[in-house]
Image (cartoon, rainbow, N blue to C red):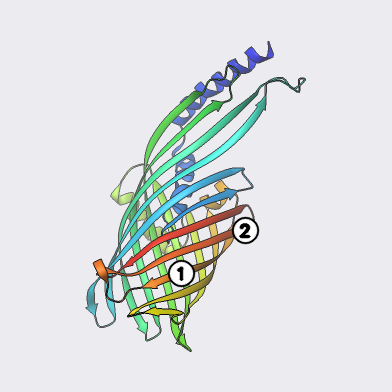
Amino acid sequence: MIRILLIIFIFVVALKAIEDLDSLEAAQYLSLSNAVIVFTSQDGLSSGVYRFTNVDTEMTMFNLPFQYQFEPLTENSNLFMILDLGYSNTRSDRDIDVDINSTTSPILNITNQLQSYVVGLGIGVRYKATENSELQFGGELLYSRLGLFSRTERALDGSISRFFDNTRDTYSYKLLAEYIYHREIHKHKVYTRFNYKLYKSFSDIKIREIIGGIIEDIKSLRSQTSVASVTLSYETNPLYSYHDMSFTMEPYLKGNYIWGDMADVAQINGYGTAGLSFYWNTPQKSANIYRYFIEPSISKGYGIEGLNLGIGFSLDF
């Protein structure tokens, strides 16, 4: 009897979930969307797995960003274009005993997943403040399609049943400010980067609402989600050379601090990343590629653990 009641209860909850998803308040749904978009539009060509331990959730994420530098506007400034492509699968599992009085009763496994596809396009300006420092300011409009579904695995009859499946379109913007200081010490290139990003999501595009949000965010320096990052790194002098090509390495440390919906949804407020980039530099720029790289890294913080791997190349047109 308890099994029958449990099945009835689950399907009532599932039907209610469909109704709730359709009538979900915009602020709640956009908070979830915003949290996903923050992770799938971060810097670096990467594929990684992140575990949010405070909410027992795992995210598998792929991100492919591009940046194209235009011809100089003045001696010390130029425009650049930003393009982001991202995908993530966020998963949370729950096991439910059918009969708490039996140690051999079947277990019902509830799987909740949020899949997202993100495409972003933006523009910015880079200003060379001094010989060793530069400033960057930019904005990006992001479109995301999110699918939220729940299903049972290892159900009582061995089948797989999907409770609900729903997709939504979300629009977001990202504002970026970055300061970069670099210099060469004994042929080692030392970098320090400070950047600050503001994210806000909308259920549809309303120009006045977006412009109003941008103005408000710039005035307050806070948004739906705010992310501040500090990166320290240095690139070695060539460790191996072949003709005009060379091999270098760049170890780095990065601290990320988070406020807003991302912090609330994932229950984290910051995390650190340690990584090591391996570069194969090709100054001849075959097909406009001037370096190839592999970049493993690990992330750790209160409520988050991550393992990341970047593989790709840098373009210079």
- Residue 169, image x, y percentages: 36, 40
Q: Residues within 10 Å of mark 1 (few under 14, many from 20)?
A: some
Residue on which the image places disc 1: 278
Q: Give the Cα separation between the discs numbered 2 and 1.
A: 25 Å
Give the image quarter of residue 154.
Answer: top right
Q: Quadrant of the C terminus?
A: bottom left
Can residue 23 be seen in the rendering of this structure?
no
Residue with the most extreme bottom position? 186
Disc 2 crowd, CA 10 A, few/some/many (<14, 14-19, 20+): some
Q: Which amino acid is tagged 1?
A: Phe
Q: Residue at x 46, y 35 (%)?
A: 148
Disc 2 marks a residue whose amino acid type is Gly
260 vs 236, nearest the viewer: 236
- 260 displayed left or right of 44: right
Mark drawn on residue 301: 2
Q: Quadrant of residue 128?
A: bottom left
